[in-house]
Image: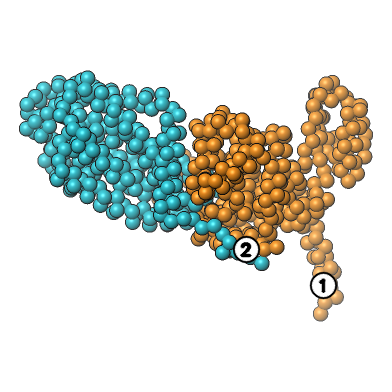
C-alpha cells in the first residue's frame, strides 16, 4: 500500500516572550526581552498507509494538534520533514488542501448564523465541485449522516452532536483522500460519540479515506483505529497495533457507581479494587484480564442498589505513566548485564 | 511507496478563484442579513452624529461664509458628512478585525487550510460586509439629511461617480488594513496599529469637514498624504460631481491599492512562518 503520510524527525518549538509580574516586571521585560521555548513536538516519525486509520493520542499539551497543523501546512516545523500525498504541506498548502480535509472538534467551519446547507454550497465552490457531482455527493452525505432535518436550521441552534455531524459531512464533500480529525468527539455525550465514531468508521471502510485521529478518549481509538501512536511532550511513547495497546495498557477499566443507599458492603471480587467510596458514590478499578468487565458489572448489580453506572477506560495519563514505567524497567534490564559485565571486563 | 502526485486534484485558475471570492462575499452578506435588527441599531449612531453636526454648523452661524471658506454650503456640508460617515462607519473598527481574533482563537487553522488563499477569503468577507453596511448607512444618512437640512442637487451621475470611487477605495483600504492585521501572526495584538491608521483616515482624510476648511498647515499635510483619496474625494464627488476629479480619484485609489499589494504579500509570506496556534 502506498504511504499517504510520511513524517521524519519532525520538530516544532514555539518561542514565547516571558513577561514579568507586576508593573516593574512588565517594564523590565520591555528593556530586557526574555524568551521561553516550548518544544511542542520532538523528533516525531511515523507513516500512514492509504486507507489506514491511525490514532495519535496523548494528554493535553502532548503535541497532537500541533502535529496535525504541521501536516496540513498551517504551521512550519522547526526541523524535520513531512510529506502528505507526496506534497510538502507547508510549501504546497493550497494544492494539498484540495485533497485532504480537517475537522477540529473545538472549532467550527460552519457559518454560525446560517443553516449548514449554506456552508456546504460555499465549500462546493471553494473545492471546485461540478454542480451535478456536488448535488449527488451532498444527497449521499445527507442520507448517511441523517442531516435532512438539520439542513434548514441555523447552525447556532444545533446541538453539539448535530453540529459535529454537519462538520464531518462538510469536510467529506470534496472526497478527500485523508481526513485529519482533531478531537472530534470532545464534549459529546455517549450516544453522540457512538454516532460520530460509526460514521467515521464507515467512511474509512467504504471510501478508503485514510484517517488521522487525535483524541483524549481511548474509546475513539479502540473503535476506529487499528494502529495507535502515543505521544507525550512531543515524543513518541508507543507505536503499535491498538490490540497491543489494549492488551498491555487498556486492560484496566474504571466503574463509577451511584448507589441508592450509603455505606453498602462491596462484594469482594478478584481483580476488582475499590478506589474511592464516599456517601452514595463508589469508584472501582477492574483488571479485565482477571475479571471480565461484564462479569464484574453483573456481580455488582446483583448485590448493590445501583442508581447510575458509568464505565470508563483508565485515564491517558495513567496509561502514559505505565508506559514510562515499562521503559524504565526495560532500561534497567539492559543496564543490569552491562553492570554485571563490569568487573569481568578487560 | 509514496502517494502519486499526478493523481491529485489541483486548484483552478484566476476565474475560479474570483468565483470563490464572490461566493464568500455572498455568504457574508446573507450571514449579516440574518441580524437586521443589529444593523439598524448601528444606524442610530449615524443619526445621532448627523443631528449633532447639523446643530453645530447652525450654532456656529457661519452662514454664507461657509461657502467662501470651504466651497460647500451648510446643506452640502451635511450631505458630505452623510457620505464620509457611511464610508468610515462601514469599515470594520479596530476591535472587529478578524485576523487577530482568528489567530488568538485558533480558527485560522480552518481558514488557512482551504484551497482559497487566506487573504482572498478575507477580501470577499470584508467586502460583503462593507458593501451592506455602506449601502444601509448611506440610505439612512440621506433620509436624515433630507429631513434635517433638505435636499441638495444630487444626480444619478454623481452617485455613480462617488460610489465607483468608494468601491475601489474599499479594496485599497482593505489591502492596507489586512497588511496591518497580518502582523498579528507574530505580534498577536494589532489594535494599536489599527487605531492609528483609522484615526489618520478620519483626521487626514477629511471625515468631518472637507480638506478645504482645514487650517493651512494641516491642509498642506493632508494634501501631501494619500488618505484624502479614500475619504475626501469620494464624498466630494457625491456633492460636487466632476469627471476630471473622478479620474484623478479613481487613479489615485487604484495606485493606493496596487502600492499596498507588495507590502501585503511580503508581510503575509513572512508572517506565515510565524503563525503560532499552539494547542487544540
x 56%, y 59%: residue:
B8
> What is the quadrant of the N terminus of chain A in the image?
bottom right
Q: Is residue B99 above or below residue B272?
A: above
Same chain for the residues under marks 2 and 1 in the image: no
Circle 2: element type: loop
On the question of residue A5 being in view, the answer is: yes
Q: How many marks?
A: 2
Q: Quadrant of residue A341?
A: bottom right
| Camera-nearest residue between A290 and B174 | B174
**Parent chain of label 1:** A
> What is the quadrant of the C terminus of chain A in the image?
bottom right
Circle 1: element type: helix
Color style of the picture: by chain
**Parent chain of label 2:** B
The residues tagged by marks 2 and 1 sit, at their Cα atoms, a distance apart of: 50 Å
Of all residues, the one furthest to the bottom in this rendering is: A346
Which percent across, then down, holds residue B257?
29, 50
On the question of residue A34 being in view, the answer is: no
Which percent across, then down, holds residue A299?
91, 32
Q: Is residue A265 above or below residue A26?
A: above
Chain coloured orange in the rendered structure: A
Image side of residue A85 versus residue A22, left or right: right
Chain coloured cyan in the rendered structure: B
Label disc, if present, on residue A342 of the rendered structure: 1
| Camera-nearest residue between A187 and B156 | B156
Circle 2: is it few (<14), some (14-19), or many (20+) Cα within 10 Å? many
Instruction: Find disc 2 in the rendering and name its residue.
Output: B3
Which percent across, then down, holds residue B59?
15, 21
Image side of residue A49 versus residue A31, left or right: right
Q: Is residue B52 above or below residue B219?
A: above
Amino acid at each position: 500500500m502506498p504511504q499517504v503520510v510520511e513524517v521524519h524527525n519532525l520538530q516544532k518549538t514555539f518561542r514565547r516572550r516571558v513577561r514579568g509580574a507586576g508593573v516593574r516586571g512588565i517594564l523590565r521585560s520591555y528593556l530586557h526581552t526574555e524568551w521561553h521555548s516550548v518544544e511542542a513536538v520532538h523528533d516525531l516519525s511515523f507513516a500512514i498507509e492509504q486507507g489506514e486509520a491511525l490514532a495519535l493520542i496523548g494528554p493535553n499539551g502532548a503535541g497532537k494538534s500541533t502535529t496535525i497543523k504541521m501536516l496540513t501546512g498551517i504551521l512550519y516545523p522547526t526541523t524535520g520533514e513531512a510529506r502528505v500525498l507526496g506534497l510538502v504541506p507547508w510549501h504546497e498548502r493550497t494544492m494539498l488542501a484540495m485533497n485532504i480535509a480537517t475537522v477540529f472538534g473545538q472549532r467550527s467551519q460552519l457559518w454560525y448564523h446560517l443553516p449548514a446547507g449554506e456552508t456546504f454550497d460555499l465549500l462546493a465552490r471553494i473545492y471546485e465541485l461540478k454542480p451535478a457531482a456536488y448535488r449527488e455527493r451532498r444527497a449521499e452525505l445527507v442520507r448517511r449522516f441523517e442531516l435532512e432535518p438539520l439542513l434548514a436550521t441555523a447552525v447556532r441552534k444545533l446541538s453539539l452532536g448535530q453540529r459535529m455531524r454537519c462538520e464531518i459531512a462538510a469536510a467529506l464533500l470534496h472526497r478527500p483522500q485523508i481526513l485529519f480529525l482533531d478531537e472530534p468527539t470532545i464534549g459529546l455525550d455517549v450516544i453522540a460519540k457512538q454516532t460520530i465514531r460509526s460514521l467515521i468508521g464507515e467512511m474509512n471502510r467504504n471510501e478508503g479515506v485514510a484517517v488521522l485521529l487525535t483524541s483524549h478518549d481511548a474509546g475513539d481509538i479502540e473503535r476506529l483505529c487499528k494502529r495507535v501512536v502515543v505521544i507525550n511532550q512531543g515524543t513518541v511513547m508507543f507505536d503499535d497495533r491498538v490490540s497491543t495497546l489494549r492488551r498491555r495498557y487498556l486492560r484496566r477499566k474504571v466503574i463509577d457507581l451511584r448507589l441508592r443507599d450509603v455505606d453498602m458492603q462491596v462484594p469482594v471480587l478478584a481483580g476488582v479494587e475499590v478506589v474511592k467510596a464516599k456517601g452514595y458514590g463508589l469508584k472501582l478499578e477492574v483488571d479485565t484480564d482477571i475479571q471480565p468487565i461484564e462479569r464484574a458489572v453483573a456481580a455488582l448489580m446483583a448485590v448493590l442498589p445501583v442508581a447510575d453506572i458509568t464505565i470508563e477506560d483508565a485515564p491517558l495519563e495513567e496509561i502514559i505513566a505505565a508506559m514510562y514505567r515499562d521503559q524504565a524497567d526495560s532500561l534497567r534490564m539492559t543496564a543490569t548485564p552491562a553492570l554485571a559485565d563490569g568487573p569481568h571486563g578487560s | 511507496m509514496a502517494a502519486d502526485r499526478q493523481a491529485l486534484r489541483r486548484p483552478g485558475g484566476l476565474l475560479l478563484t474570483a468565483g470563490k471570492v464572490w461566493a464568500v462575499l455572498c455568504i457574508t452578506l446573507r450571514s449579516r442579513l440574518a441580524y437586521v435588527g443589529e444593523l439598524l441599531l448601528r444606524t442610530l449612531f449615524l443619526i445621532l452624529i448627523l443631528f449633532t453636526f447639523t446643530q453645530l454648523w447652525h450654532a456656529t452661524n457661519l452662514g454664507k461664509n461657509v461657502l467662501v471658506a470651504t466651497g460647500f454650503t451648510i446643506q452640502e456640508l451635511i450631505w458630505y458628512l452623510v457620505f464620509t460617515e457611511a464610508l468610515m462607519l462601514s469599515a470594520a473598527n479596530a476591535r472587529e478585525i478578524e485576523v487577530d481574533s482568528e489567530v488568538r482563537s485558533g480558527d485560522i487553522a480552518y481558514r488557512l487550510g482551504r484551497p482559497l488563499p487566506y487573504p482572498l477569503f478575507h477580501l470577499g468577507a470584508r467586502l460583503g460586509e462593507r458593501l451592506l453596511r455602506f449601502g444601509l448607512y448611506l440610505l439612512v444618512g440621506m433620509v436624515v439629511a433630507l429631513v434635517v437640512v433638505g435636499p441638495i442637487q444630487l444626480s444619478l451621475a454623481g452617485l455613480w461617480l462617488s460610489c465607483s470611487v468608494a468601491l475601489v477605495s474599499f479594496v485599497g483600504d482593505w489591502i492596507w488594513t489586512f497588511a496591518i492585521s497580518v502582523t498579528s501572526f507574530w505580534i498577536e495584538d494589532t489594535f494599536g496599529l489599527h487605531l492609528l491608521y483609522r484615526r489618520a483616515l478620519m483626521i487626514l482624510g477629511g471625515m468631518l469637514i472637507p480638506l478645504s476648511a482645514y487650517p493651512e498647515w494641516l491642509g498642506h499635510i493632508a494634501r501631501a498624504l494619500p488618505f484624502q483619496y479614500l475619504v475626501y474625494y469620494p464624498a466630494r464627488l457625491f456633492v460636487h460631481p466632476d469627471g476630471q476629479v473622478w479620474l484623478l480619484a479613481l487613479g489615485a485609489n487604484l495606485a493606493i491599492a496596487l502600492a499596498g499589494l507588495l507590502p501585503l504579500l511580503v508581510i503575509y509570506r513572512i508572517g506565515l512562518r510565524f503563525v503560532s496556534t499552539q494547542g487544540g
